[in-house]
Every structure is written in structure tokens, then in C-alpha cells.
């Protein structure tokens, strides 16, 4: 069997092309770190802006949650307040020229009154009790809890894992990031704290 050897010019041109390609790649990887592409610079600033806005949103969400918790405690208004105001206005006025017809309003009895537990003021000295009070009315993410506690991410993760393993909180794995909400056992612990408040 005879093997045809290509001409020396063909072999030389293939070797030369290979060497030029290797040198080109070497030069590209040496020079590319020093050349900044506009897109990369744009992406870096976008990332910083997104992180800044994310921090702002988390801060506003925590403040809004705190305002909602305070608003729930202050909303205990009388349902017949408008009727009382109207009767007081009638009592202050002189006797009217024509008789006023008093129409009795049917009394509406609510089927079930939902009362939210009053959250006592707890200092973050005991993080477990503090976190249980935080998530009593609303589920929170680990990041929200971390920012409220002003602890590290690792510390908050260990704390939430302990609360989950002890059965005080349940983890919602369907949403990303995971949210934590209080369980019946956790509510019982909160009830114990209200009966026996923490002494300073």
C-alpha cells in the first residue's frame, strides 16, 4: 500500500497557519484584560444600581410591615361611630320644626370577630422570641428577618433552621426566596410570653 506524501509547500503552509493561530490566541488573552468593553462597564454599573434599589426596597418593606403591625393595633374603632356622631349633632341642635323620623337600623352581628394578638414590645435580647413575634401576623423571608435583627446571614440561617427543626415555624418552599410563617406550637410560645412577660 502506497501513502502519498503531500508536497512540502502544503505541509509548511499548514504548520505556519497553526503557529499564527496559536500566537493570535495568546495575544488576544494577554491583551483582553486591559481592554474594557462598553457592555461590561454598563453591566457593572447596572449591577450596583440593582443592589442599591434592592436594599432600598427591603428597607421600605420592613418599614411598611412595622406600620401595618402598628395600624392593626390602632384600628379598634367603634362600628357605630357615625350613628353616635349623628345623634350628638341632633342633640346639640334646637328642636326641629318638623318631627324627625327615627328609623331603627337593623343590628348587624358579625359571624366571627378575628382579633389579632397584641404584640408586646420585645427587645432583640432573645432572638427566638423576637422572630416569633415578627412573623406572628405575616410570613417573612430570611433576608427580611436578617435585616430586622441586624445579624449576619449565617446567624439568621442557623436561627431559622433551629426554629424550623423545633417546630415553631414552617417553611414555604414553593416561593423563592423561602418564606417562614409561625406554627401552632409557635403561637403557643407567643401566648406563654404574653402571660409571663420577659423581665429585664
Image (cartoon, grey):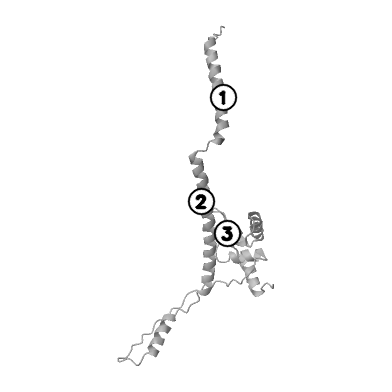
**Label 2 Cα crowd, 10 Å radius (few <14 / some 14-19 / many 20+):** few
Q: Residue at x 57, y 59 (%)?
A: 144
Whichever of labels 1 and 3 marks the residue nearer the N terminus, that label is 1
Front residue of 77 and 147: 147
Q: Residue at x 52, y 48 (%)?
A: 47
Whichever of labels 2 and 1 marks the residue nearer the N terminus, that label is 1
> Image quarter for residue 168?
bottom right
Q: Which mark is residue 166?
A: none
In the rendered view, tell whether residue 70 sits above or below residue 80. Answer: above
Q: Position of residue 175 (x, y in %)?
A: 53, 54
Mark 2 and mark 3: Cα distance apart in space? 20 Å
The quarter of the picture where the C terminus appears is: bottom right
Whichever of labels 2 and 3 marks the residue nearer the N terminus, that label is 2
Secondary element at image label 2: helix
Secondary element at image label 3: helix
Q: Position of residue 164 (x, y in %)?
A: 64, 58
> Image quarter for residue 24?
top right
Residue that sits furthest to the left in the current view: 98
The quarter of the picture where the N terminus appears is: top right
Decide if residue 112 is on the left or right side of residue 119. left
The residue that disc 3 covers is 144
Q: Which mark is residue 49?
A: 2
Q: Position of residue 16 (x, y in %)?
A: 55, 18
Mark 1 or mark 3, whichever is nearer to me? 1
Residue that sits furthest to the top in the current view: 2
Mark 2 and mark 1: Cα distance apart in space? 40 Å
Decide if residue 111 is on the left or right side of residue 134. left
On the question of residue 184 being in view, the answer is: no
In the rendered view, tell whether residue 64 sits above or below residue 109. Answer: above
Amino acid at each position: 500500500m502506497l501513502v502519498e506524501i503531500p508536497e512540502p509547500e502544503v505541509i509548511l503552509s499548514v504548520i505556519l497557519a497553526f503557529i499564527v493561530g496559536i500566537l493570535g490566541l495568546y495575544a488576544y488573552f494577554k491583551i483582553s484584560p486591559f481592554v474594557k468593553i462598553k457592555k461590561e462597564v454598563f453591566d457593572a454599573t447596572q449591577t450596583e444600581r440593582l443592589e442599591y434599589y434592592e436594599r432600598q426596597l427591603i428597607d421600605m418593606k420592613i418599614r411598611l410591615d412595622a406600620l401595618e403591625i402598628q395600624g392593626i393595633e390602632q384600628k379598634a374603632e367603634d362600628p357605630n361611630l357615625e350613628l353616635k356622631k349623628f345623634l350628638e349633632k341632633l342633640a346639640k341642635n334646637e328642636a326641629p320644626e318638623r318631627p324627625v323620623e327615627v328609623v331603627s337600623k337593623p343590628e348587624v352581628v358579625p359571624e366571627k370577630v378575628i382579633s389579632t394578638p397584641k404584640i408586646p414590645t420585645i427587645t432583640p435580647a432573645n432572638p427566638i422570641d423576637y422572630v416569633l413575634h415578627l412573623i406572628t401576623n405575616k410570613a417573612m423571608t430570611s433576608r427580611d428577618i436578617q435585616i430586622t435583627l441586624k445579624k449576619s446571614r449565617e446567624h439568621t440561617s442557623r436561627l431559622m433552621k433551629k426554629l424550623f427543626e423545633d417546630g415553631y415555624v414552617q417553611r414555604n418552599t414553593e416561593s423563592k426566596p423561602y418564606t417562614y410563617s409561625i406554627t401552632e406550637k409557635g403561637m403557643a410560645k407567643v401566648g406563654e410570653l404574653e402571660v409571663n412577660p420577659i423581665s429585664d
